[in-house]
Amino acid sequence: MTALSVYSFGEARTANGQQLQFTCRPNEQSTISAFLAEHVGDVSVPMNRVVSLSHGAYQQYSRYDIKQDKYAGSDGESGSCYAELLEIKNPPDGRCGVVIYWYGTNGDGGFSEWGSLADARSAWAKSGVRSSGKAAKECKGFIRFVECGVLRPWFYAIGDEHLVGDYTCPRGLNDHPVYRLGTRFLAYDQDGVPGIKTCLGARLIPAEKDNNGFMSRTFEVPEHYVVYWDDGTVYDEAHRAPWWTTEKYPAPRLIGNDDLWIAEATRQFRLLLAGKTNAFSINFTDGTKFNARIAPSKDRNPCAEGRYRVAVSCKGIRTKAGWADFVPTPEAPDVVAYVTQKLVEQGKTVTRVEILEAEVKPGGKKWAGAYISPPQK
């Protein structure tokens, strides 16, 4: 074969499951993949090239030829995050080779795809490093945004990890027609409590004999799948509940249109806990409505965003009144704490704070949130 002037990249597995990368003429990936799977057991190569990219204090590895064009990182009270503009020079199977990847240590992140490196650079400069919001979608060359969550994007695959859609997962997890990587299900935990879980893949377990020494009995276990969830739990088709119970929990159910209210209720509750809102309601399909609201105690100081007129008494200073613009924060969750904090910073000793008037901002922040605690002194 002569050298290829026009070519495409592909990936495939041999008959023994070895992960391979190859370069071929356009539109021949499927032919070569089928040949390798049927006729080739293993291939020996002199060296397995691994690319290392710097991310602050640690390295990220990939089996692809990647150039990090832009990088930015930050540390804050809610965790660390970084973003990078990557040019992947050998994307397999027609995948996009220019992405802006964003990752946070609190478990979120994703990547946007761009038509060219110049478009991605322009978007990086205009819409910020995350490039996932409305501003990014309006930039020239934007293709789409992929949420990753706890999953790792395909371009950071290493070794023999295989690609499933936009993500990478360990060898041995099968491409199940239902339990697909990244798909959400209504699944049960070991106590039989249902919840929304994200599938990480499924592994096929061959038929075997299960010798339970405690009960001195041998069970025939047929071939079955074990499904792995993003919270570390599993669903075993052969044992729908833990061995210590005789219950049989229902099988996981794919989240469909009729179940979207469950995901929406979960999202709304997370917003409430984060302090983005203090109430929400969910309409059930039978006409029933669920209402949730934060109800502060009667003696609690006002914590809604707005403008407050307060009277303040300080040691050695007569009482003064004035207006204060307030937004709840972890350090100052209510108006009194906010005013007191500001005066203490000025070296004053506050003896009394009285709220005279309040102009609450419509749609403003209602409270500091349940997740955050004031910093330890």
Image (spheres, grey):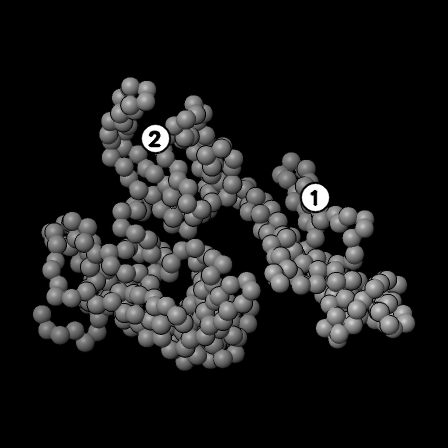
- How far from the left and from the top, in percent, is residue 155? 33, 64
The amino acid pointed to by label 2 is Ala
Could you tell me which secondary element the residue under label 2 belongs to?
loop
Q: Which residue is mark 1?
A: 291
Horizontal placement of 118 versus 24: left or right?
A: right
How far across and how far down the image is residue 232, in percent?
41, 45
Q: Quadrant of the C terminus?
A: bottom right
**Marks 1,2: beta carbons within 8 A:** no
Disc 1 versus disc 2: distance between alpha carbons? 39 Å
Q: Is residue 362 left or right of residue 169?
A: right
Please name the residue shown 71% across and 49% down the image: 294
Question: Quick one: which residue is furthest to the top in this view?
Answer: 216
Q: For the residue labelled by badge 1, is the local secondary structure a helix, a strand or a loop?
A: strand
Q: Residue furthest right?
A: 318
Q: Residue visible at 33% across and 56% down?
A: 168
Mark 1, Cα crowd under 10 Å, few <14 / some 14-19 / many 20+, is few
Q: Is residue 177 visible?
A: no
Amino acid identity at mark 1:
Asn
Q: Residue at x 46, y 80 (%)?
A: 122
| Vertical order, 332 against 232 (above or below) | below
Quadrant where the image shows the N terminus: bottom left
Are there few (<14), some (14-19), or many (20+) residues within 10 Å of tag 2?
Answer: few
Q: Which residue is mark 2?
A: 238
For marks 1 and 2 on the same chain, the one whose residue lies earlier in the sequence: 2
Residue 88 percent across, percent down from the top left:
32, 71
Point 16% across, 49% down: residue = 16
Residue 72 can be seen, yes or no: yes
Q: In this view, which residue lies farthest toward the front?
A: 316
